[in-house]
Image: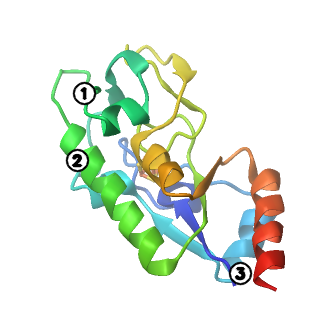
Amino acid sequence: MERILVSACLMGRPVRFDGQAKTVDDALLAAWRTEGRLVPFCPEVEGGLPVPRPPAEIEGGVGGPAVLAGSGRILTAAGVDVTGHFLAGAQAALAVVRAMNLKIAILKDGSPSCGTLRIHDGTFRGRVAPGSGVTAALLSVHGVRVFGEDRLAEAAGYLDELEAVRG
Ligand code: SF4
């Protein structure tokens, strides 16, 4: 059975910067949970950041790939550089993916860690820009297919493909 890495906040865990969850109430996710497919994970907590924590954004909205390449930073609104924690969290996610041979992840869009198609633009004004977070980018580089929480139907299609190959 294929298992799926999932942002812990989407499963009701109160691990976001504001101490809240971002629970997704969806039949697909509920079914996968019942089947025991879901592996909840929060890169920022695993990277050593506390709950709650100051919100952070990728400077200039340049995206996770730039951070991974060493040309981008992740800062709090006060200018504290938390890049190291985000990179540590991404590496921890990759370690879980490798250990469990996961090929698919469902991640909270908009997050500087978990964003798949959108991130905040670095201005702390609630504006989003196209791009991915650090964990999403690292997992993608290593062959994991990442989907935002609003693309569960696409994720289900890919899961079917994986299961068909597995036979
Ligand atoms: Fe959710 Fe990811 Fe942010 Fe953790 S890092 S709170 S899993 S969006």
Task: Give the amino acid at mark 3.
Answer: Thr
> Which numbered dot is residue 153?
none
Judge depth for marks 2 and 3 and give the one in front.
Answer: 2
Other-residue count near label 3 (Cα within 10 Å), few / some / many at <14 / 14–19 / ≥20: few
- Drawn side of residue 64 relative to residue 72, left or right: right
Residue under pointer 1: 75
Q: Earlier in the sequence, mark 1 or mark 2?
A: 1
Other-residue count near label 1 (Cα within 10 Å), few / some / many at <14 / 14–19 / ≥20: some
Q: Position of residue 32 (x, y in %)?
A: 72, 73
- Above or below — where is 158 with respect to 107? below
Q: Earlier in the sequence, mark 2 or mark 3?
A: 3
Asked where in the image residue 161 lies, by quadrant, the reply is bottom right
**CB within 8 Å, label 3 to label 1:** no
> Which numbered dot is residue 85?
2
Q: Residue sitting at 47 percent across and 69 percent down?
A: 97
**C-alpha separation, residue under disc 2 versus residue under disc 3:** 32 Å
Q: Residue sitting at 19 percent across and 44 percent down?
A: 84
**C-alpha separation, residue under disc 3 versus residue under disc 1:** 38 Å
Q: Position of residue 14 (x, y in %)?
A: 43, 56
Judge depth for marks 3 and 1 and give the one in front.
Answer: 1
Task: Give the amino acid at mark 1.
Answer: Leu
- Above or below — where is 21 with respect to 120? below
> Which numbered dot is residue 34?
3
Q: Position of residue 162 (x, y in %)?
A: 75, 71
